[in-house]
């Protein structure tokens, strides 16, 4: 078993000072390096709040997050920014590309924020662009791409600083089924080839079932934390297309069954 | 520097907005350069017209009407004042011009024409006749000549201070551009004046002087008063005798400063509001940059850099525009007697440029702070 990459302890989040809204209560779990996990839950269940807390975008009202051995409980905004830049890549439902910059410049951005020169970053940027099948699009503006291409550029950008953890919040929420499938195939490939841990927020049970571990959040609480035995069978590896997936690819794949390791609680119906 | 390159890109991708802000700064600084130079040159012109052709410092005997000895010590003391550019000893007296039943008082200033010219430039203002002051000659002003139907070559009759009559030939008529000066002042030969006043070769009624910077006349007068060679003499300077003019000049300066100040305030408000809008427009980009790890301070610098770029380019265009306006104004007035040339001062132009950049920078503080404080979660949650 790999070392603990992320330790979430008793995480809680309450919004509002007078009228208080409890978004998350006492969530604890550990994520190992290289894990491929998902957070599932209905809309408003608190799954995005959980992702924002472990991604150090938000601060918990209770509990703490330890990222790669760094206890962030008392970290300043500056220290949290540095940890995000060093260890985490983000992919959101909206691609959040910077429209003023080209594809290459967008991908370079996390490295430039880290203070590395463009010349030193360029080989790495070209490597991740190639990995995502985006060769030839380097000079294009972010607004000149298709939806699938934009999301792949966002993924390339998230991978730029070789993050130990990639957090994805409904990353295919704005994509059609073909691109959705391609993106998840890509995540799986990156997880296997680069050893990057993934934590994917989704409300789609069929998507979650393709990950190795599912954390289910309901009403702000961690309802269940199950490991998918499909990890041992590894059908995803067999289903991997011979070439890297690209927008427009349709990859036939059987939906693996969810087999909880320890589950006395019935999973709630899909949302 | 990442914040600089992002700032430049943001500006380049919103060209209309960037040009509008820079144009606002350019107009403000252009007005500042033009108006400031105009007022300064107007004041210089006014001062020059008022006292340029008259003594700015006068050394006289303490007793009114008494003469002073123009000693070597006094000459040296005057010469040692580095600010003094011209020294002319004169002998002045009042006389009454008589023509039939008409009479008119006149102040006659006696001296050597070449010396008198260094202050009064009588030769340069000659409108008719010859610039010369012979033993029995007088040069009178245009208005005096017209009022008394005198022309060059005429003989004018005077009653001198001692009551004796005198006849002097009008050798030339001058025009100082001031009816008062033209009506009351006339010039005669210094030796003739000495004879009228009964003064010796080294005796004069006054020593007139001009200084390089007219507004330093007070300091120079103070310095002269402290000289032993001037003990028992009084030193008067033009500022003491022209309080109204000085007050008018100060009022003009104040109004000019007020206009410039409010123009800059208007420019600052314009930049601040446009940058604030720009900061709102770029909230999503700033949020995602912060999510990727950009520090608060670095993100705040984006708008400071934007302001600096806009400030430098706007102020540079403004200075250029202001100088072009000045050149046009001067060109338009090259043949006019009512317009005056504007001389832009390098120091003032540099200060205007710096002020333009600073105003832009200060205007960016609010959007910069706002950007610095932005929490990436606000953008991520907002979608």
Image (cartoon, coloured by chain):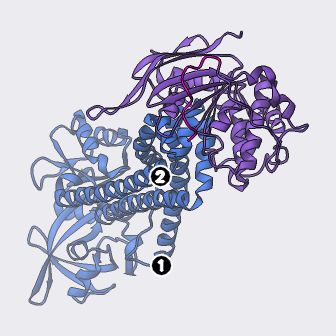
Chain colours: A purple, B blue
Mark identifier at residue B349:
2
At 11% across and 82% down in the image, what residue appears?
Answer: B103
Pick the front one: B52 or B73: B52
Residue B94 shown left or right of residue A88 in the figure:
left
At 13% across and 71% down in the image, what residue appears?
Answer: B160
The chain containing the residue under callout 1 comes to B
The percent position of residue B266, horizontal first and vertical second, equals 36, 57
First in sequence: mark 1 vs mark 2: 1
Residue A87 shown left or right of residue B194 in the figure:
right
Q: Secondary structure at mark 2?
A: helix
The percent position of residue B61, horizontal first and vertical second, equals 15, 48
Q: Nearer the viewer, mark 1 or mark 2?
A: 2
Q: Judge whether residue A35 can be spotted in this image.
A: yes
Give, as a single range, the part of the protein colored magenta: A261-271
Q: Magenta stretch: dominant SS? A: loop
The percent position of residue B157, horizontal first and vertical second, equals 18, 81
Residues packed near mark 1 inside 10 Å, few (<14), some (14 to 19) or many (20 plus): few
Q: Secondary structure at mark 1?
A: loop
Based on the picture, tell me whether residue B352 belongs to the magenta stretch. Answer: no
Q: Judge whether residue A149 can be spotted in this image.
A: no
The chain containing the residue under callout 2 comes to B
Q: Does residue B48 sit above or below A33 in this rendering?
A: below
CB contact under 8 Å: marks 1 and 2: no
Q: Please count the marks in the image.
A: 2
Residue B196 appears in which quarter of the rendering?
A: bottom left
- The reply to the same-chain question for discs 1 and 2 is yes
Q: Which residue is mark 1?
A: B335
The percent position of residue B170, horizontal first and vertical second, equals 30, 80
Pick the front one: B188 or B1: B1
Residue B163 shown left or right of residue A41 in the figure:
left
Based on the picture, tell me whether residue A270 belongs to the magenta stretch. Answer: yes
């Amino acid at each position: 078993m790999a070392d603990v990459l992320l330790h979430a302890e008793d995480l809680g989040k309450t919004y509002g000072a007078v009228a208080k809204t409890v978004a998350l209560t006492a969530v604890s779990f550990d994520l190992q390096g290289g894990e491929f996990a998902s957070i599932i839950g209905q809309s408003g269940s608190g799954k995005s709040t959980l992702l924002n807390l472990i991604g150090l975008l938000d601060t918990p009202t209770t509990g703490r997050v330890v990222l790669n051995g760094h206890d962030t409980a008392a970290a300043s905004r500056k220290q949290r920014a540095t940890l995000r830049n060093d260890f985490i890549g983000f992919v959101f439902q909206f691609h959040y590309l910077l429209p003023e910059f080209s594809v290459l410049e967008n991908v370079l951005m996390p490295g430039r924020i880290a203070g590395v020169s463009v010349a030193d970053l360029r080989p790495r940027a070209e490597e991740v662009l190639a990995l995502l099948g985006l060769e030839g699009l380097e000079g294009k503006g972010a607004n000149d791409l298709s939806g699938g291409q934009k999301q792949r550029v966002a993924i390339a950008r998230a991978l730029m600083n070789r993050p130990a953890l990639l957090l994805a919040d409904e990353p295919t929420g704005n994509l059609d089924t073909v691109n959705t499938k391609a993106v998840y195939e890509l995540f799986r490939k990156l997880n296997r080839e680069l050893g990057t841990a993934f934590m994917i927020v989704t409300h789609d049970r069929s998507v979650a079932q393709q990950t190795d571990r599912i954390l289910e959040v309901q009403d702000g609480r961690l309802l269940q934390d199950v490991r998918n035995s499909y990890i041992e069978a590894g059908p995803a590896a067999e289903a991997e297309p011979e070439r890297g997936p690209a927008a427009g690819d349709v990859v036939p794949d059987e939906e693996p069954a969810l087999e909880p390791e320890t589950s006395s609680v019935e999973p709630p119906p899909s949302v | 520097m990442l914040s600089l390159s992002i700032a430049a890109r943001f500006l380049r991708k919103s060209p209309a907005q960037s040009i509008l802000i820079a144009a606002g700064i350019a107009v403000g600084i252009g007005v500042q350069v033009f108006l400031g130079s105009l007022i300064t040159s107007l004041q210089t012109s006014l001062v020059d017209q008022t006292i340029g052709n008259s003594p700015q410092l006068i050394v006289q005997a303490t007793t009114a009407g008494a003469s002073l000895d123009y000693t070597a010590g006094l000459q040296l003391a005057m010469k040692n004042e580095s600010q003094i550019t011209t020294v002319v000893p004169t002998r002045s007296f009042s006389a009454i011009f008589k023509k039939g039943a008409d009479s008119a008082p006149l102040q006659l200033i006696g001296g050597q024409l070449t010396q008198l010219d260094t202050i009064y430039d009588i030769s340069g203002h000659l409108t008719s006749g010859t610039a010369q002051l012979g033993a029995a000659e007088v040069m009178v002003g245009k208005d005096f000549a017209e009022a008394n139907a005198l022309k060059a070559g005429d003989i004018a009759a005077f009653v001198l201070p001692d009551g004796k009559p005198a006849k002097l030939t009008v050798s030339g008529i001058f025009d100082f551009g001031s009816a008062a000066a033209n009506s009351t002042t006339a010039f005669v030969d210094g030796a003739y004046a000495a004879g009228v006043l009964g003064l010796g070769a080294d005796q004069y009624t006054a020593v007139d002087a001009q200084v390089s910077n007219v507004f330093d006349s007070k300091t120079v007068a103070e310095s002269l008063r402290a000289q032993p060679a001037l003990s028992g003499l009084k030193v008067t300077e033009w500022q003491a005798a022209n309080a109204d003019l000085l007050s008018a000049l100060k009022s003009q300066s104040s109004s000019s400063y007020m206009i410039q100040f409010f123009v800059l305030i208007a420019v600052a408000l314009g930049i601040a509001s446009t940058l604030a809008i720009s900061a709102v427009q770029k909230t999503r980009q700033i949020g995602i940059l912060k999510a990727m790890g950009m520090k608060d301070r670095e993100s705040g610098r984006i708008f400071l850099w934007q302001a600096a770029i806009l400030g430098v380019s706007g102020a540079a265009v403004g200075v250029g525009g202001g100088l072009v306006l000045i050149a046009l104004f001067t060109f338009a007035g090259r043949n006019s007697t009512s317009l005056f040339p504007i001389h832009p001062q390098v120091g003032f132009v540099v200060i205007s440029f710096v002020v333009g950049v600073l105003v832009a920078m200060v205007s960016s503080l609010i959007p910069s702070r706002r950007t610095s404080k932005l929490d990436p979660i606000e953008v991520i949650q907002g979608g």
